Image (spheres, rainbow, N blue to C red):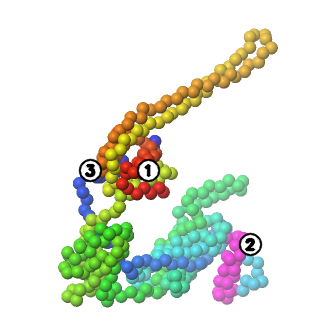
Amino acid sequence: MALACAALALNAPFGAPAFAEPRIKDIADFEGVRENQLVGYGLVVGLAGSGDSLRNSPFTRESLAAMLERMGVSSTNGNLNTRNVAAVMVTANLPPFAAQGSRIDVAVSALGDARSLAGGQLLVTPLMGADQQVYAVAQGPVAIGGFSAQGQSGSSVSRGVPTAGRIASGALVERELDFDIAAQGELRLALRNPDFTTARRIAEAINGALGGDAARALSPGQVAVRRSDGYSGDMVALIAAIERLEVAGDAPARIVIDETSGVVVMGENVRVSTVAVAQGNLTISVNETPRVSQPAPLSEGETVVVPQSDVSVEEDAGDLAVIEGVRLRDLVDGLNRLGVSPRDMISILQALKAAGAIQAEIEVM
């Protein structure tokens, strides 16, 4: 089977020397220091006949007419019949502490029945946040990673998604988010994977480096960091001092199974009680060997094909193997000795969980 089992690949790293512990900045985020989503509606022009059909996309027609009116061009009495324009949705992420005048990348996606955005130019598009305030303005040529071509006979070929693209540094930040982090007296760390043990270890590591009780665990997902009165630096210096501290993270025992691809991922803390496992496969083969029956010479018979089937059944010997209370590496070694495939391993793990012999949470994707 060509599918690879992630649990088997984990066998080597656990036998190798331990790596350095992750830094606090890699397992937690500072509340307030985050991105904000922006969205806008705009028009892409300059398409070579691959834009929206104005008859099927009335919003494109109305937007085009409104834009021409703002430009001083009256289109009320004219017949707009062009396929060089496409209505698009523009999205972007506003980074934390983005200064006015800095540039960010934007993604452009077709909204109507446009076939491709290749060669298009996005016109000035305001990008708004959740508070309906404009924080950036996007404009520029759209770069797409796919293409589509169609012949007169109706045959077509496409690769990627030609109706979606990006504009590198295509938006100019017009409004800054006010957040004076240097004047803050206390900030909270938000753990990406909430855990009581990890939160306590983070607080202990910060207190060990700074002294006193600068940090305290509020919950499995939050750690409060306070700037003491005797600290000479501001909150920015305090964050820089603690985000590079190394902390050993902890997580509950969990097994993740993707039944579609046959991938199995097991955490280091998975434990298995003493249990006996037997694994075998049943293979049924049907071979068709047709034979030709011909009549005697000068007879009135007909030549016919006589089917002949050969059915065979083969069952692998399923030896009963005993797996005692072991860690992850020993469990993988035992399953490897049984010669199980990734899909067989999925069935075995689910059976172990049903028997109460595996102390881990199984998550099926």
Q: Amino acid at mark 2?
A: Arg
Marks 2 and 3, the one that precedes in the sequence: 3
The residue that disc 1 covers is 354
Distance in Å between CA atoms under marks 2 and 3: 65 Å
The residue at the point 40 percent across, 38 percent down is 278
Distance in Å between CA atoms under marks 2 and 1: 59 Å
* One can see residue 46 in this view: no
Q: Please give left or right for residue 112 compared with residue 35 in the image.
A: right
Name the element at disc 2. Answer: loop
Q: How many numbered circles does the render carry?
A: 3
* One can see residue 153 in this view: yes
Marks 3 and 1, the one that precedes in the sequence: 3
The residue at the point 38 percent across, 34 percent down is 319
Using a 10 Å C-alpha cutoff, classify the residue at mark 2 as few (fewer than 14 neighbours), some (14 to 19) or many (20 or more).
Answer: few
Give the magenta range: 52-73
Using a 10 Å C-alpha cutoff, classify the residue at mark 3 as few (fewer than 14 neighbours), some (14 to 19) or many (20 or more).
Answer: few
Front one among 167 and 212: 212
Q: Please give left or right for residue 146 compared with residue 6 in the image.
A: right
The residue that disc 2 covers is 55
The residue at the point 25 percent across, 59 percent down is 19
The residue that disc 3 covers is 15
Marks 2 and 1, the one that precedes in the sequence: 2
The residue at the point 61 percent across, 60 percent down is 148
| 289 is higher (above) or lower (below) than 264 | above
Name the element at disc 1. Answer: helix
Distance in Å between CA atoms under marks 3 and 1: 29 Å
Does the segment drawn in magenta span residue 65? yes
Q: Does the residue at mark 2 contact the one at mark 3 (Cβ under 8 Å)?
A: no
Front one among 153 and 189: 189
Q: Does the residue at mark 3 contact the one at mark 1 (Cβ under 8 Å)?
A: no
